[in-house]
Amino acid sequence: MQISWLPIIPFTASQAAELGVPRGRLRRLVEDGGVRRVLHGVYLRGDVVLTTHLKVAAASLVIGPTAVACDRTAAWLWDVDVFGHRELDVVPPIEVFALRGHTRTRRNEALGGVRDLADADWIQLDGVKVTTPLRTALDLGCCLHRREALAAMDALARGHAFSTAELARELPRYRRRRGVVQLRGLVPLVRPEAESMRETWTRLAMRYFGLPEPAVQYWVVLDGVPTYRLDLAYPHARIAIEYDGRLHHTSRADRARDEQRRAWLRAHGWTVIVVRAADLAPGADDGWLYAVRDALAQAHRRPRRIYS
């Protein structure tokens, strides 16, 4: 059977069977890459781009009318992926909570329970209840590990334009909730300007090493024109911290542009420190942090008096 005969919207195994595709055939199509699992029990043709609209359509097939998509499932619906690399081999469970007074979802592939949510905490997307980006950020700040939590909060703030002040106003509601101590520490650190998860991790590592807060996405201006944008910077000390991610720094042309830009910066008095993915792995050498510390110390060294 050709996959072009399958619908271009998400479908369940039962719906596929009605179209003449039994479970065994569907399983083989998944193994061959012609069909992919979107959620537990929900499938999509492999040649169809998974848009936000299709994510919501997929969720509507498995999330009941009294349940609210929360936590990582809500972030996924808001186009923020917070699932770890080790989780990518399997479809993660959906995270849904029932509103107070309703029965919790009892499915093996669902995680959750009952959660007190105000009307302002959730909205409906094409019939699917999902926590707002603001509420999702606060919940993830409690339940994820610190650096993954801050990266998710940065991404949600970047994509949905809420401020640290709005996050802070909601903090009293989280009193005594598990994870609230971490959340209180993360809220002041949220920076919508951060452009990637690893940039956020870099900034957080610098903070917990005891370094001052750097500027995020700082522009170097030449003749009044913003010309070079730096991931993190101490502008007065002329120190640039650049994260080299695999996505944007692997081609020869990308590397040539990076080296040209960094050569210009060094020639004009900047100290450039490059951080790579291996530098952020657990147990990795933190030499780059000492390099930042030493560069700051050098920049703030007392000038020597010159005697005639």
Image: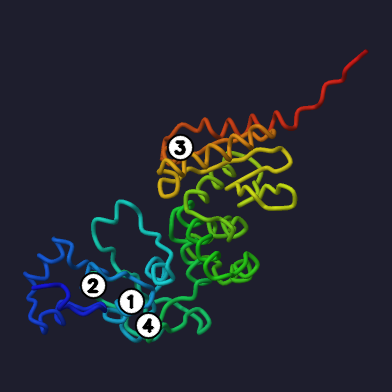
Residue corresponding to mark 4: 128
Along the polypeptide, which appears first: circle 4 or circle 1? 1
Please give left or right for residue 61 compared with residue 194 in the image: left
- Percent of width and height locating residue 174: 54, 68
Please give left or right for residue 217 compared with residue 130 in the image: right
Along the polypeptide, which appears first: circle 4 or circle 3? 4
Residue corresponding to mark 3: 279
Q: Amino acid at mark 2?
A: Leu
Measured Cα–Cα span from mark 1 to mark 2: 9 Å
Q: Quadrant of the C terminus?
A: top right
Q: Amino acid at mark 1?
A: Leu
- Quick one: label 4, few (<14), some, or many (20+) residues within 10 Å? many
Q: Say which of marks 4 and 2 sits in front.
A: 2
Task: Check whether the beta carbons of the residues at disc 1 and disc 2 lie within 8 A of each other.
Answer: yes
Residue name at image x 70 percent, y 53 percent: 225
Residue name at image x 11 percent, y 67 percent: 27
Q: Secondary structure at mark 3?
A: helix
- Percent of width and height locating residue 251: 40, 44
Please say if 284 is above or below 182.
above
Residue 44 badge: 2
Q: Amino acid at mark 4?
A: Val
Q: Say which of marks 1 and 3 sits in front.
A: 1
Along the polypeptide, which appears first: circle 3 or circle 2? 2
Please give left or right for residue 61 compared with residue 200 in the image: left
Q: Nearer the viewer, residue 20 or 279?
A: 20
Along the polypeptide, which appears first: circle 1 or circle 3? 1
- Percent of width and height locating residue 163: 62, 67
Q: Kindly indicate the quadrant of the structure image that contains residue 113.
A: bottom left
Residue 54 badge: 1
Measured Cα–Cα span from mark 4 to mark 3: 40 Å
